[in-house]
Image (tube, rainbow, N blue to C red):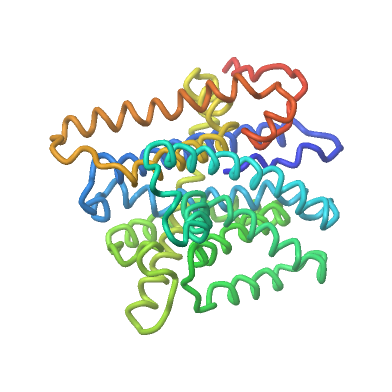
Amino acid sequence: MLNTTGSDVPGPRTPEAKDRELGLDFAKGVLITLVIVGHVIQYVVYRDGGFWESPCFKWIYMFHMPLFMAISGYLSWRALLRKSFTRAIGDRAVQLLLPMLFWYALLEAAKLAVFSSSASEPGSVLRCLNDSAGTYWFIWAAFVSFLLVKILLIFNRWSPWILFVSVLLVALTPVTFSILPLIKYTFPFFCLGFSFAQSREWWTGIARSHKPLLIMFLSIAALVCFLAWRKDTYIYNNLALVHDMQSAQNVLLMLVGSAAASAIVIVLILQCWKVGRSKRVISFITVELGQSTLLLYLIQGTIFRLMDSIQYGELWDLTTRLVVAGILGGAIVAVGLTIRWIVRDIPYLSQLVLGAPPRPACPKYQPADN
């Protein structure tokens, strides 16, 4: 999800590597769109908790954040292996946490303007900490995952086994405080993406040799998990906590279903990229949305958290809700792209708002002729 391509690392860049990164930009553009769609389903189309049973909501939430985290892990391997500990963590904190704090300050200012009494509530500091974690939980999950893997690499330069053990330890930790269950859920996917980046040739060789069989197996697994997915399968409800046989089944179904669905979806997305990259809509998703995922995530998180504090839509019929959902989703994208266009070349402000320093002028992406 995050702009973690490690482009600051010098070295030759083959056409295949550049093409692969554009394909992942397209994947991130698709995924951030699904994040917004999932939230408008939750906050606008459904207002009574019925979204848990929505097939569209269930399909999106099976894979969108796990796949985002896997892509983040894949794109983080250069920073994890080639930067010192202090530089890697410092750069990641500036990239992720600084813009998050900026947008959270805007959120609190908006809430203070609309609900002036909220600032004087008891325990408001604790509430602010909890709000920032809950509103932008993926930012914290990505940062903590990056930090944990970097710590592991201090003791062992690269070993699949140490990552596997860390995944088991994190997954089996019986904690339910704040966003820790969400970190437990997404950390294995970050490690999987990082592992794939480190062993690309090995993974690619297996995929090429058994591609039809793997796709068939993963498709069946994803379909079975989709049909079995229930309200208690979501991480928000089971908290990745195993205390009896039923909870163990829910957590296992969640992890297996997310992994299978993520694998199938990334194959489909990259295939769409290869076939349709000459199309303008593919170019728009790749360049505009795919390279603005951090900003769009922060904006939509700010807006939907603010919507938690207001009453709206109780008397809207389904048609009205769908129209409002479409308008809101489009407005989030339009606002995000406008802000990016305004501040992307302004020193310091670009870092503060977008999480990225001003970039030197470079040729725009040109779709292929074929």
Residue 109 drawn at (x, y percent) = 49, 38
- Would you say 246 lies left or right of 7 here? left
Question: In this orientation, which residue lies closer to the viewer: 174 or 78?
Answer: 174
- Name the quadrant of the N terminus: top right
- Would you say 321 lies left or right of 283 here? left
Residue 39 drawn at (x, y percent) = 36, 43
Question: In this orientation, which residue lies closer to the viewer: 27 or 243?
Answer: 243
Q: Residue furthest bottom?
A: 244
Question: In this orientation, which residue lies closer to the viewer: 272 or 249?
Answer: 249
Residue 259 visible in this rendered orientation of the protein: no
Q: Residue at x 38, y 57 (%)?
A: 222
Residue 65 drawn at (x, y percent) = 48, 51
How many marks do you count on the picture? 0
Q: Residue at x 48, y 40 (%)?
A: 107
Q: Is residue 47 above or below residue 26?
A: below
Quadrant for residue 319, please give it: top left
- Name the quadrant of the C terminus: top right
- Would you say 171 lies left or right of 74 here? left
Q: Residue at x 26, y 29 (%)?
A: 324
Quadrant for residue 5, please give it: top right
Q: Is residue 344 above or below residue 299?
A: above
Q: Is residue 366 above or below residue 89?
A: above
Q: Residue at x 40, y 49 (%)?
A: 118
Residue 244 drawn at (x, y percent) = 36, 84
Residue 260 visible in this rendered orientation of the protein: yes
